[in-house]
Image (cartoon, rainbow, N blue to C red):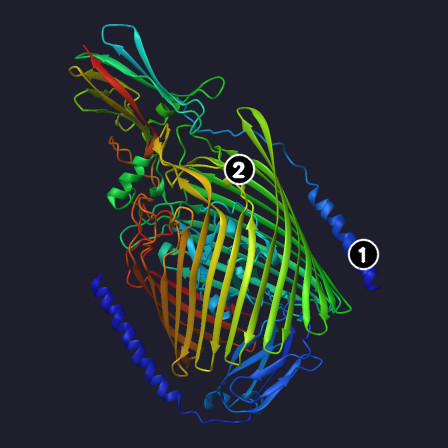
Amino acid sequence: MKPAHSLLTITLAFTITAVIWSCGTKEAPAPEDENELITTVRLTFTEDGTTTPQKFEWKDLDGDGGNAPTTSRITLKASRSYKVDVEFLDESKTPTDNITDEVREEGDEHLVVLTPTPSSLFTYTASDKDSRNFPIGLSGTVATGSINQGLLRLQLRHQPPVNGQSVKNGTVAPGSDDVNITFDVVVAP
Amino acid sequence: MKNSQRVVRLFIILFFIGLLDFNTVYAQNTANCDCFVKGVVKDRETNLPIVGAVLTIKNTSKVTTTDTDGHYKFDRLCQGSYVLECKIIGYKTTRTTIALQHSAEENLNLSEDEVHLQDVEIVARRVTSLTQPSGSLQNQSLEQTRGQTLAEALQKIVGVTMLQTGASIAKPVIHGLHSNRILIINNGIRQEGQQWGSEHAPEIDPFIAKRLTVVKGAAGVRYGSDAIGGVILVEPAELPYTIGSIRGELNTVGFTNGRTGVVSGTFEGGLKKWKGFGWRLQGTLKNGGNIRTPDYFLANTGVREQNFSAAAGYRSVKFGAEVFYSQFHTNLGIFSGSHIGSTSDLLSVIQNGEPFIKADFNRAIERPNQLVDHDLLKIKAYRQFSGNRLSLTLGRQHNQRAEYDLHGPQAALKPALLFRITTLTGDMVLEHKPIAKEITGQIGFSGLHQYNFTDGRPLIPDFEQSNAGAFVIERWIRQKWEWEAGLRYDMRWLQVYRFIGQTLDQRNHQFNSWSGTVGSVFNANSHLSVRANFGTGWRPPSVNELYSKGVHHGAAAYEEGSESLRPETAYNLMGNVEYTSERFSAEIGLYHNSIQNFIYLKPQSEPILTIRGAFPYFKYVQTNATFSGADVTTEWNITPRWEHTAKISYLRAYDQAANDYLVAIPANRIENGLRYKIGTVIHSHDSFVSIGHLWVDQQKRVPPNSDFMPPPSAYHLWSIQVGGDIILTEKQKITWGIMGQNLFDTAYRDYLNRFRYYSIEQGRNFSLRLKWIF
């Protein structure tokens, strides 16, 4: 083979191979699908002896970043007792995805913690229990103190087993935050 | 703890006393001046003999050249140690140390010829760059890193450090630059995975390599403009084109820490009937469990790795072709204690001083973990015609990376993030015949097409990318001077497919620019050479820098890309002085890399409020940065048996626009090694024992308040190694080695470990290496 010929042959072979090589079937881009998004945390307070629920929400419909989240201010009456329910929703999906049930089902590795500041604002007592008799904290009762104002930190702690051993012990320490948000609270007369 | 340190020290002292005794016995050999050295000089790539190579025995008057078959011979040499130098245009000068030394007892059964004969095969490589500093690991130095990851192994080269994400993930850092700013060339193909992520380790089985080379500084012209920090070459051995039988090697390595076991085997051979045909099969298995620090185990830090590769090729004088396929599969556990949901989680771990999660030894890999697969198919062919050589290389890679988070409330079996990237590359290089017998060079074209899909949590969008480049490099060698110059032009097209809500939004970017290199070597005499190189390179912003948006878990940071970023341009000036004599050699390299429009994450004043609380907010912005430093290596043969080596690397990185230091820059370090060559003990030849000490300074050059905790303090690490070769038969050999790392179980943290907030580093680790060559 003459050099010129061989050069041509190689270049041709190269081009053909390159064309075949790159003609793979390619899929179309698909939107992202975050399977762990929580956009909304809803607190429902029902004063003992009444049937009218008061709903307070923390919302970040577009997820992390973008538009800032919105929070409603929690207004409660002093020295009363309330039944409280906590809900976690993904409102970016249609229909809205309610994550609360899954938290309850996996109660052995989740804990909802409500921390008021100052601590005299109210006390929270969880009424639900997991299979090992530790609180889950999705429902409970709040007993408010005297007239005051402050903050409520709500955490959803994810406390999955480590090396097959449960770590949930009813305290906030193990695991990590799935939710960590703050509400303004006013305890009025 | 203290007692055990004392015992270890005592052992070391006793060991050395024992060695000194050996030394006196062995020194009683009589000199013999009838030795000779002969051999053949071949091109490493083509396996063809090199005619006219000049060979000199340093510090003697002996000079010879290779004949038409590449053969050479030196005779009438006395017993002793010599440095054989081989030089020819277009190839890097090689220096081989040969020991013409035998003990009298051993020689008795051998014929007279073989007693003092040493056959040396010099394998010359066409050089990447004559003028740019580089370092490489091969033979014994590579041997000693077997079982370690690519990044751990490369740390032995001065100027190279690593960026870790816990005990299981490490990436190489060259002169302070990493990820997208360095290129890894795996068997001639540029490695394309998700390099941008600092927790994405290179998907390469180091057992494939016969040689690991790091070209330091902007080496864009030959390998691609984006190599602004350097290039790592992972080079397998030549296929066995000339042997007719089957041969191979089996490597086993066991580590006490993590109780990690590694087995790697290679079989290769040629065909008697088909001359010039060669094949190779290679595979590696790795299994490790939880890593132990001096104080506690790190939960979920196990690793499982299964890799294999197959290659076959044909080679004749004028034509050659090769097919290579490799598969890399790893399952990496990520330290459970590093999982945080919010900034307050991170702050409480730091305050606690040790992880909340404690574990025992365990091999199970749970979430969070990474499942990474990398496939590479390569076809290469070349043809020689009238002194020119044309080669074509095609590569197809598929990289799949599944990252499993410690799942949230919605238990799903799907990974939180799944990246699938396919890359097609094509390179055509013409090496022309010497012009006026003095100028050699190459002209090349390279193309790349790649597409990426990201599923799961929003992080980076889907994209498609194409690259086209052309380059020319010419070299001129005249007497004491060697010159080199190169030029390259690249174009890149990037199409990004994002979803804003449910609507597809396509963005197009186009980047193009020149890069160049010019350099020179002055070989003042046989001892001293001076080299200087100026190189430029440019790197278009990558997709994560343009479009990433979200919380970086583990880093407790909200990171946001910027669509308006422009390419970075590096101007890299390097100077190197190399001194070699029989007993002492030293290399001093200085560099100054100035990067215009350097892309980095800048902290913003306001945090981002998310469902997991407030996160510090970082945006990708550009500045002008400089990386200046020095690499120093010395080797001193104190006596024929004692050898001292030292490595110093110094780096200072500065943000010129902000007038402040840059974050995440490796701290300065000094490494010392003392080695004693025992020679033959019982049946082990070339035996040695060495101790090593590494000092890493505290990184004091950081911007104020840039981190959740101050950079960790300086630390000292000691190591010990013993090893040798046991010759079984003419063709069979066992190479053994025992190594102890972090000998005194020092508790320390490293600034370039992203998990430094969560835990201290690995504790003491002993390993046993056995390699059986058959």
Q: Residue at x 84, y 64 (%)?
A: A2
User: Label 1 is found on which chain of the structure?
Assistant: A
Q: Amino acid at mark 2?
A: Ser
Which residue position holds label 1? A8
Mark closer to the observer (1, 2): 2
Work out whether residue A175 can be spotted: no
Q: How many marks?
A: 2
> Residue B309 at what x, y percent from top left?
59, 56
Q: Nearer the viewer, residue B396 or B460?
A: B460
Which residue position holds label 2? B564
Q: Amino acid at mark 1?
A: Leu
Mark 2 crowd level (few <14, some 14–19, many ≥20, 10 Å Cα): few
* Callout 2 secondary element: loop
Q: Residue at x 25, y 42 (%)?
A: B351
* Callout 1 secondary element: helix
Quarter assignment of residue B356:
top left
Residue A151 higher or lower than B691, as above or below: above
> Residue B680 at what x, y percent from top left?
43, 81
